[in-house]
Image: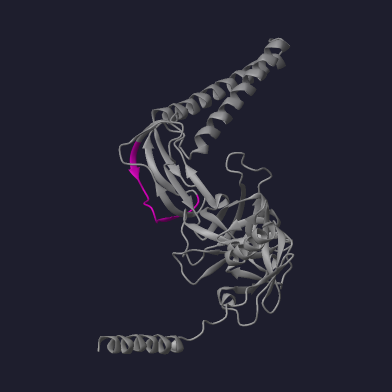
């Protein structure tokens, strides 16, 4: 009885094992691997690895935009900064920031003993000239009558001329600041240009001194309708910086708008500390949308630049060289050596090795690198 049961049990196990073995499917054949021949990688048709790769054409740098950081400042040709010409005390302030003023208009009034001294010098010079004029007339009359010698006449004429010169100097000094000949010690601070008061650094009763070096201007008057664009560029940006050329200015604070500017000057030297070149443009701000000291971007067309632009991630550095992967057909990619230039905001300029319109791998470059390394290791083994 027991042996019969044992035989049935062994037979059932054998049948179950046989059925289980018949139900298993055969393993699929391994996917064909990419082939490496020299510097070319060839993927078989339908390879899943191709889905990882992204290919894009190389862009011509002469058709791309060079974007530089810039800062807006007042046009110094239309700006005046008012400083105190004499020591004194502020008596009255006549304008406020935002006020429009005419050329020669008073901005503030100060009481200045030093200016009063200049007025007194004018009065003294006028009295000395009157006395010298009378003395010359008297000596000349005596000389004509043969009483006075010629040397007295020459001395009187010299004294008269010195008195005339001193009077002219004293009057010009007082007149330069718009003061009167009478001694009132009142000096008006005036604007030399018409414009808008954009800055005021003066208070009533403030004591003013002329020997305070580095002190800010009491008033800044400018024409906000015209601004300068101060640009920081690098050596490799020089081909795009053409004096007299046009460029665009954009600001994050004025979205969707761009302003045309003209490049007026490019410095003849490079800052040894920052290795940057100063350039200056100007633009019309009649709509007053842009403000002084605003940070903006300046966009130049990189005309004449002999380079192409590729994504920085498309170029890898290995074995002491920089490489990119050029598409040579369906599933075929060639590794070629390139010469990189300047990288800015994820875009890399390539000065040698690529031509505009060629298609290179921009995503999945590391996969291609791994394939090359694996092939190299296999060949070494």
Which portion, as a residue range, is magenta? 90-103
- Quarter location, residue 215: top left
Expressed as whole percent of the image width and height from the top left, the position of residue 318 reads 64, 55
Closer-to-camera residue (184/256): 256
Asked if 5 appears above or below 289 in the picture, the reply is below
Q: Is residue 244 visible?
A: no
Give yes or no for residue 94 being in the magenta stretch. yes
Expressed as whole percent of the image width and height from the top left, the position of residue 209 reads 41, 31
Give yes or no for residue 202 being in the magenta stretch. no
Closer-to-camera residue (13/35): 13
Asked if 23 appears above or below 192 in the picture, the reply is below
Q: How is the image coloured?
A: one colour
- Quarter location, residue 352: bottom right
Residue for point 67% across, 42% down: 269
Q: Is residue 237 left or right of residue 249?
A: right
Furthest residue toward left: 1
Q: Is residue 175 left or right of residue 380?
A: left
Closer-to-camera residue (33/352): 33
Asked if 342 appears above or below 35 in the picture, the reply is above
Closer-to-camera residue (175/276): 276
Expressed as whole percent of the image width and height from the top left, the position of residue 112 reads 39, 31
Residue for point 46% across, 31% down: 213
The quadrant in which the N terminus is found is bottom left
Q: Is residue 202 visible?
A: yes
Residue for point 40% across, 56% down: 99
The quadrant in which the C terminus is found is bottom right
Expressed as whole percent of the image width and height from the top left, the position of residue 179 reads 46, 37
Asked if 267 appears above or below 26 in the picture, the reply is above
User: How many numbered marks have been drawn onto this rendered protein structure?
Assistant: 0
């Amino acid at each position: 009885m027991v042996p019969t049961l044992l035989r049935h049990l062994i037979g059932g196990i054998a049948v179950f094992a046989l059925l289980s073995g018949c139900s298993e499917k055969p393993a699929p054949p391994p996917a064909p691997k990419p082939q490496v021949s020299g510097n070319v990688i060839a993927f078989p048709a339908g390879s899943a690895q191709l889905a990882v790769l992204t290919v894009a054409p190389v862009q011509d740098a002469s058709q791309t935009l060079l974007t530089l950081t810039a800062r807006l400042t007042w046009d110094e040709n239309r700006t005046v900064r008012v400083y105190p010409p004499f020591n004194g005390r502020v008596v009255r302030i006549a304008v406020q920031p935002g006020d429009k003023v005419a050329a020669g208009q008073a901005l503030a009034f100060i009481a200045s003993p030093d200016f009063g001294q200049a007025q007194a010098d004018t009065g003294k010079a006028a009295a000395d000239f009157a006395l010298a004029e009378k003395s010359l007339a008297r000596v000349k009359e005596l000389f004509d009558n043969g009483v006075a010698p010629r040397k007295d006449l020459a001395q009187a004429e010299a004294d008269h001329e010195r008195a005339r010169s001193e009077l002219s100097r004293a009057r010009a000094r007082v007149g330069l600041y718009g003061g009167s000949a009478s001694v009132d010690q009142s000096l008006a601070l005036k604007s030399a240009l018409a414009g808008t008061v954009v800055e005021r650094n003066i208070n009533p009763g403030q004591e003013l001194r002329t020997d305070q070096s580095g002190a800010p201007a009491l008033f800044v008057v400018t024409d906000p309708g015209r601004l300068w664009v101060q640009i920081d560029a690098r050596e490799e940006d020089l081909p795009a910086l053409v004096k007299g050329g046009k460029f665009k200015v954009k600001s994050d604070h004025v979205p969707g708008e761009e302003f045309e500017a003209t490049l007026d000057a490019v410095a003849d030297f490079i800052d040894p500390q920052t290795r940057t070149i100063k350039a200056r443009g100007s633009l019309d701000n009649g709509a007053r949308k842009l403000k002084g000291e605003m940070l903006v971007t300046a966009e130049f067309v990189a005309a004449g630049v002999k380079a192409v632009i590729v994504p920085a991630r498309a170029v890898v550095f290995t074995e002491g060289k920089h490489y990119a992967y050029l598409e040579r057909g369906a599933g075929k990619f060639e590794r070629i050596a390139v010469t990189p230039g300047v990288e800015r905001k994820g875009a890399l300029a390539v000065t040698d090795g690529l031509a505009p319109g060629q298609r290179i791998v921009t995503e999945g470059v590391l996969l291609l690198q791994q394939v090359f390394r694996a092939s190299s290791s296999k060949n070494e083994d």
